[in-house]
């Protein structure tokens, strides 16, 4: 009976073996050939490995890569780098990092699927020693009051990996990354780079050098010095806003300093948004330092506006403090309006009365008249020009004087023109762009100062004076009231 059981068991095992087919390995050493691995660009902490695979089957290789160790015959139980599937025959390579300096390594290429892992022949190499990177500092250029441009060239990586590079600077010298005031970070690796140095103080001497950092230490280029420019943008203050109307207003400013470079343009800029710049609406009101007046025009009625003065030099544009104002609702009379034979340039607080300027000059050169004769009774105030003109005409019989030219004027259907007072003439200067036709020179006012002197205004810059005698010849522009 025992013999029968033994025979039965043997037959069952034989039958099971004949029914189960062992899976055949898809690849074998005779079907996949891996060449000897080689390395180049050997460094202290990394290298580049290369190998070649020839696959004599049609199926792709699901995984390939390299494995390495300090012990011979490295395999996937140690350090390895998978490069994923390999579809085509041929060479493949990888950068192997994390190596130790002056150490012998063994490396093999491999291929792998779910059945087999095949290793190529072993190769050995020794890493180099690790030193600090070598780097040169570029010359400093494009120096401004607050910035400069420098850079460097990493000439060698010290047999490691340059992890960061840039320039560092301070104002004391003896410069390192530890005592630098600030530094840039301009990429990795060897080669040249450019650094933008910002946040500097004007008129200050700085020490600067390039640096590069690898796994061991920092390498430095030579220290160079430079001094930032003393130039800066102009300093300017914004004047208060006046003569606010439905579509216009008057502002201006005062250029305190030119920043060390001549002011080439100045004015005000405005917008319905805060912090207006010269990219918004703006005026252009002369050059240089000092006080200027600006016409703000083409405004929308009943709207909040923001205005700032500005001044520009070779360095850039400086802005004054911001002021806000709201335009009036639509008015019957407004500055710049063609009305009553000329252009309205002043409206009083009632918004119903004001002054109108003739659209053109009435004389290119006339005397004020009656030198060394004191007329008396004239005023410099707004609203007094008409009375001044009457006093002059009634008490000075000289022909072709400025006041008489205005008194005799019949223009656009109106004959009540007069020579403006000093302050009325100043208002004309403030609105000269709206009135038009002026020359940047002296114009007479009807305001007497003494027996031989009276007030006049330069319509080019608004300067008031009374140093020339009544016998001088200046231009004449008549006005009338409404």
Image: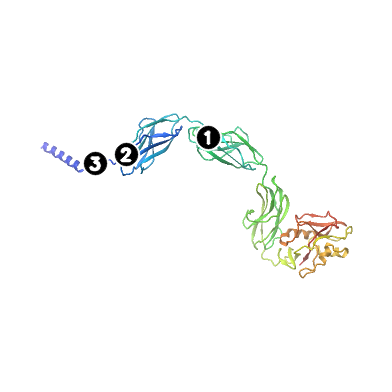
Under circle 3, the secondary element is loop
Under circle 1, the secondary element is strand
The residue wearing badge 3 is 22
Residues at circles 2 and 1 in contact by the CB criterion of under 8 Å: no
With 31 as the anchor, is 269 left or right in this view? Answer: right
Q: Which is in the foreground here, disc 2 or disc 3?
A: 2
Mark sitting earlier along the chain (2/3): 3
Q: In the depicted view, which residue is nearer to us: 326 or 247?
A: 247
Q: Is residue 39 visible?
A: yes
Q: CA distance from mark 2 to mark 1?
A: 42 Å
With 191 as the anchor, is 63 left or right in this view? Answer: left
The residue wearing badge 1 is 155
The residue wearing badge 2 is 32
Q: Is residue 349 visible?
A: no
Look at the image and tell me in which quarter the N terminus lies: top left
How packed is label 2: few (under 14 Cα within 10 Å), some, or many (20 or more)? some
Question: Is residue 273 depicted above or below 14 in this figure?
Answer: below
Question: Is residue 22 depicted above or below 72 in this figure?
Answer: below
Percent across and percent down for residue 288 are 72, 50
With 453 as the anchor, is 427 left or right in this view? Answer: left
With 69 as the anchor, is 155 left or right in this view? Answer: right
Mark sitting earlier along the chain (2/1): 2
How packed is label 1: few (under 14 Cα within 10 Å), some, or many (20 or more)? some
């Amino acid at each position: 009976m025992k013999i029968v059981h033994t025979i039965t068991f043997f037959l069952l095992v034989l039958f099971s073996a004949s029914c189960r087919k062992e899976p055949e390995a898809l690849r074998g050493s005779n079907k996949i050939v891996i060449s000897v691995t080689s390395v180049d660009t050997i460094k202290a902490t990394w290298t580049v490995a290369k190998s070649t695979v020839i696959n004599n089957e049609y199926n792709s290789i699901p995984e390939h890569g390299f494995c390495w160790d300090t012990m011979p015959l490295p395999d996937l139980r140690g350090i390895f780098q998978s490069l994923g599937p390999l579809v085509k025959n041929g060479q493949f390579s990888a950068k192997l990092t994390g190596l130790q300096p002056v150490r012998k390594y063994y490396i093999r290429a491999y291929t792998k699927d779910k059945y087999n892992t095949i290793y190529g022949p072993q190769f050995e190499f020794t890493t180099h020693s690790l030193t600090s990177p070598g780097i040169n500092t570029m010359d400093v250029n494009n120096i401004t009051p607050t910035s400069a441009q420098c850079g460097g060239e990493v000439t060698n990586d010290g047999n490691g990996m340059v992890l960061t590079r840039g320039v560092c600077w301070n104002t004391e010298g003896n410069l390192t990354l530890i005592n630098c005031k600030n530094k840039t970070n301009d990429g990795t690796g060897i080669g040249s780079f450019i650094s933008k140095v910002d946040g500097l103080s004007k008129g200050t001497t700085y020490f600067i050098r390039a640096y590069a950092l690898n796994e061991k230490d920092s390498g430095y280029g030579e220290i160079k010095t430079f001094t930032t420019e003393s130039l800066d943008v102009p300093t300017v203050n914004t004047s208060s806003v006046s003569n606010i109307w439905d579509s216009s207003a008057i502002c201006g400013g005062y250029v305190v300093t030119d920043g060390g470079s001549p002011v080439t343009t100045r004015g005000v800029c405005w917008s319905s948004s805060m912090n207006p710049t010269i990219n918004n609406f703006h005026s252009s009101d002369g050059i240089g330092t000092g006080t200027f007046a600006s016409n703000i025009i083409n405004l929308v009625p009943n709207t909040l506006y923001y205005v700032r003065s500005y001044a520009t030099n070779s360095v850039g544009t400086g802005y004054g403090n911001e002021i806000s104002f709201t335009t009036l609702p639509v008015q019957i009379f407004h500055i710049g309006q063609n009305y009553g034979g000329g252009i309205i340039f002043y409206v009083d607080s009632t918004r119903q009365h004001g002054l109108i300027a003739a659209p053109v000059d009435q004389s290119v050169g006339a005397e004020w008249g009656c030198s060394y004769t004191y007329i008396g009774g004239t005023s410099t105030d707004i609203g007094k020009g008409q009375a001044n003109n009457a006093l002059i005409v009634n008490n000075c019989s000289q022909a072709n004087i400025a006041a008489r030219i205005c008194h005799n004027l019949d223009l656009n259907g109106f004959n009540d023109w007069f020579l403006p007072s000093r302050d009325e003439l100043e208002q004309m200067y403030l609105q000269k762009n709206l009135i038009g036709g002026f020359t940047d020179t002296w114009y007479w006012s009807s305001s007497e100062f003494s027996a031989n002197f009276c007030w006049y205004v330069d319509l080019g810059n608004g300067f008031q004076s009374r140093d020339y005698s009544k016998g001088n010849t200046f231009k004449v522009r008549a006005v009338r009231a409404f």
